[in-house]
Amino acid sequence: MSTLFTPYNLSGMTLKNRVIMAPMTRTRTMNDVPDEVVALYYAQRASAGLLITEGMPVSEEGRGYLYTPGIYNDAHVQGWRKVTKAVHAKGGRIFAQLWHVGRMSHTTLQPGHIAPVSAGTVQAVNTTVFALTESGEPGPVVPSQPRALETHEVKRITADFVHSARLAMEAGFDGVEIMAANGFIFDQFLSSELNTRNDEYGGSVENRQRFLLETIDAVADAVGNSHVAVRLSPFGRIYDLAPYEGEEKTWEAITDALGQRELAYVHLYYQPVYTKAPLPEGFRRRFRNTFKGTIIAAGGFTRDIAEQALEADELDLVAFGVPYIANPDLVERMQNGWPLAESDRTTYYGVSGSPEKGYTDYPVWQAE
């Protein structure tokens, strides 16, 4: 029997299978509050063992893209409650991904049009965010120059994550995933190139990882460690994140720190894909041996690659991203050997005529 389609016990919660829907930004909420269309999108994909939502900004400051639904006020709670009810009605499980983009933002998205915040003042230039252009129209723009957070402000952002985690549980989520991957705020603190601070959050590896670990611990204290997970992208290069001095030691330290914590899972996003990620020899095995909890991996998986990784005991659950856009019944298609539909890249983000287009209008498989 295929391991990919067997049940799995995740912190006392039974998943129907080991297929995970990876978090994917789709920018479909014009007022930043999820509605019935968003609820339908997730419910259509509820045959996955676990759904992980798109990144939810934990504050206005944490937002880096237009039309991304947050989780920091009562309207958000009411909107996301529609989503969790729809998913649970289909027998699915769903975690909320909590997000602060740091420097990956633009002044047009920030309250009062002030500068976005980061570990330091290094601007991200070889990338774009989805904000307002000079003409006032939505579009890709280079992120604005950030300002460095004051020491006391770092704990304020940790508090924002705690607040959002509590609201997520109130909205009916099964747990929360702290977004610490893809060059966003926690990666910015981990990088010795971007983090040139001389306070307790800069300098040594211990100091640079302090913000992430304090946030994980605070969220776990608030909602229970069995409901808390974290997503990382070790040695990632996305969104203008460059190699930095001491990078390998930094990830060894993160591995050791997480090995001392009991979490719902750690979600590792390997870039560009799982089979070609630029990792030091033995990193995957070291992480597996050090962190004794559940490991999810993402990064260009196919069914065959997923089965091989599970068989090799490199991970426990496998996250699929892009295939889920055009295949709401991805589990059933893979399980039965049915062909996968191709998605339309032009409708990945934003509203092209209607929110449903390229979002909830992909059909399930039907034999000819």
Image: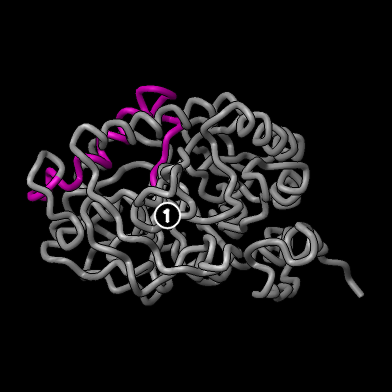
Magenta stretch contains residue 264: no
Helix, strand or loop under label 1:
helix
Residue at 55%, 41% in the rendered image: 70
Furthest toward the front, the residue is 135
Residue 339 spot, x, y in % from top left: 74, 75
151 in relation to 303, above or below? above
Quarter holding the N terminus is: bottom right
User: In this figure, what is the number of numbered marks?
Assistant: 1
Residue 151 spot, x, y in % from top left: 18, 37
How dense is the environment of label 1, judged by Cα within 10 Å: few (below 14), some, or many (20 and up)? some
- Decide which of 80, 333 is in the foreground and name it: 80
62 in relation to 13, above or below? below
Res. 227 visible in picture: yes
Query: Can you tell which quarter of the image residue 216 is in?
Result: top left
- Decide which of 284, 71 is in the foreground and name it: 71
Residue 72 spot, x, y in % from top left: 51, 32
The stretch of residues the image draws in magenta is 202-230
Magenta stretch: dominant secondary structure: helix
- Decide which of 199, 40 is in the foreground and name it: 199
The reply, left or right, for residue 71 in relation to residue 159 is right
Residue at 68%, 58% in the rendered image: 331
The reply, left or right, for residue 242 in relation to residue 198 is right
Query: Can you tell which quarter of the image residue 325 is in?
Result: bottom right
The type of colouring in the image is one colour
Magenta stretch contains residue 210: yes
Res. 294 visible in picture: no
Residue 356 spot, x, y in % from top left: 78, 58
Residue at 69%, 48% in the rendered image: 42
The reply, left or right, for residue 342 in relation to residue 191 is right
Residue ID for mark 1:
107
**Amino acid residing under circle 1:** Thr
362 in relation to 118, above or below? below
